[in-house]
Image (cartoon, rainbow, N blue to C red):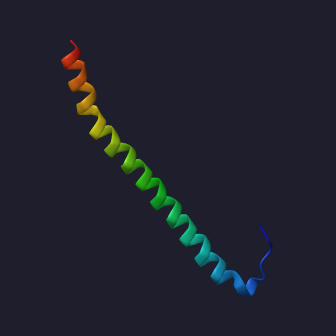
Amino acid sequence: MHNTPPMAGHHEDRTSYVLALMSKLLALLTGLARTLTTLHLWPAITRNGHLMS
């Protein structure tokens, strides 16, 4: 990271805010995808378990 002059502070704040927002969105999407794959796989796993037993 490089030191920015005080004049560019507003722009830097906006950039860091956008980056934080994007990382939050990414984490949310990752969690959602993980939940969806779990929900999709769970019935198949239980169905296979029932079929095997």
User: Could you tell me which residue is drawn at 45 percent across and 61 percent down?
Assistant: 25
Q: Is residue 28 above or below residue 18?
A: above
Q: Residue furthest bottom?
A: 7
Identify which residue, 11 or 50, lies in the foreground. Answer: 50
User: Could you tell me which residue is drawn at 62 percent across and 76 percent down?
Assistant: 13
Quadrant where the C terminus sits is: top left
Taking the image as shown, residue 28 lies to the left or right of residue 38, namely right
| Rendered location of residue 11, percent (x, y) | 64, 82
Residue 5, image quadrant: bottom right
Q: Is residue 2 above or below residue 27?
A: below
User: Could you tell me which residue is drawn at 69 percent across and 81 percent down?
Assistant: 9
Taking the image as shown, residue 18 lies to the left or right of residue 33, namely right
Residue 14, image quadrant: bottom right
User: Could you tell me which residue is drawn at 41 percent across and 48 percent down?
Assistant: 31
Residue 12, image quadrant: bottom right
| Rendered location of residue 35, percent (x, y) | 34, 43
Taking the image as shown, residue 52 lies to the left or right of residue 36, namely left
Quadrant where the N terminus sits is: bottom right
